[in-house]
Amino acid sequence: MPSASAGSSVHSGGLRRLYDVLLEAHGPQHWWPGGSAFEIAVGAVLVQRTAWRNAAGAIARLAERDLIDPSAILDLPVSHLQRLIRPAGFFRQKSGTLRSFSAWLVAAGGFDSLQAYPTAELRAALAALRGIGPETADSILLYALHRPVFVVDAYARRLLTRTGIRPDAGAVDYASLGGWIEEQLPADAALLGEFHALIVAHGKARCRPRPVCPGCPVEDICVYASGG
DNA sequence: ACCCAGGGTCATA
DNA sequence: TATGACCATGGG
């Protein structure tokens, strides 16, 4: 018998099955297919509470000027940085976050140097930066540093709640929920990266109405699924 | 005009 | 602990 794991009795392997169903329904999302680790981290900051289209526009404006580089960001006058990232919204806050993150990264010796540190330590260091919370920290860990981390976002909480995999997902704190999920999945950054992207894609496309949308591909593993 | 988008921080009760 | 206000742009 597997050791005690809350909630696994009803949905044994539920998370892995959810991944399979989402992949089948939506296909691979290929987030950040090409691009440096720094560009990925910049994207993680710029996309906060913002449509990806807008964040991508801001990244393009930086890229056109060869500014996707921590030292280049730091050398740039703040007003110029703010003007360039304006399409991403919250540009005053995000300019400060990008500068703080760039300074931290340069001080650490770059992304290659970061790989020497354990995930928990990096997560704490990132989340200590102003403008980087738990979710953005995990996004950077996952997509830029390829650490096997589950990114807990609002879509994930909603989906876990509605499927009944974790009915209290909306109320549990970030670290507890993320850790609980990571325990049940392979420590595979590629899988977890695809999973997060799929959850976002699903959240945008489906299940807006509650409690469950008719014809939803996730319906058959949903505790609320009825005859409708 | 209204709502939302791949969050985070701070003030208040 | 838990809401609420605020940050700002762009598309449906």
Image (spheres, coloured by chain):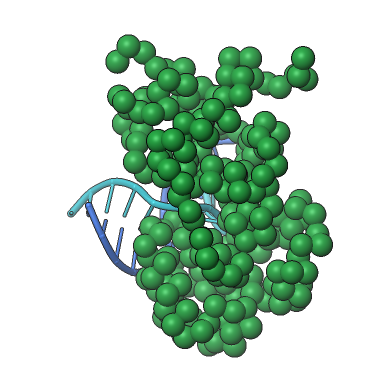
Chain colours: A green, B cyan, C blue
Query: At 64% across and 70% down in the image, what residue appears?
Result: A101
Q: Position of residue A123 (x, y in %)?
A: 71, 55
Quick check: can you spot residue A42? Answer: no
Q: How many marks?
A: 0
Query: At 60% across and 75% down in the image, what residue appears?
Result: A99
Q: Is residue A204 above or below residue A210?
A: below
Query: At 58% across and 70% down in the image, what residue appears?
Result: A36
Q: Position of residue B6 (x, y in %)?
A: 46, 53
Quadrant for the N terminus of chain A, please. top right
Q: Position of residue A177 (x, y in %)?
A: 63, 35
Q: Is residue A125 above or below residue A227?
A: below
Quarter location, residue A70: bottom right
Q: Position of residue A140 (x, y in %)?
A: 62, 58
Give left or right: position of A104 versus B5: right
| In-front residue for pair A53/A16 | A16
Q: Is residue A73 above or below residue A114?
A: below
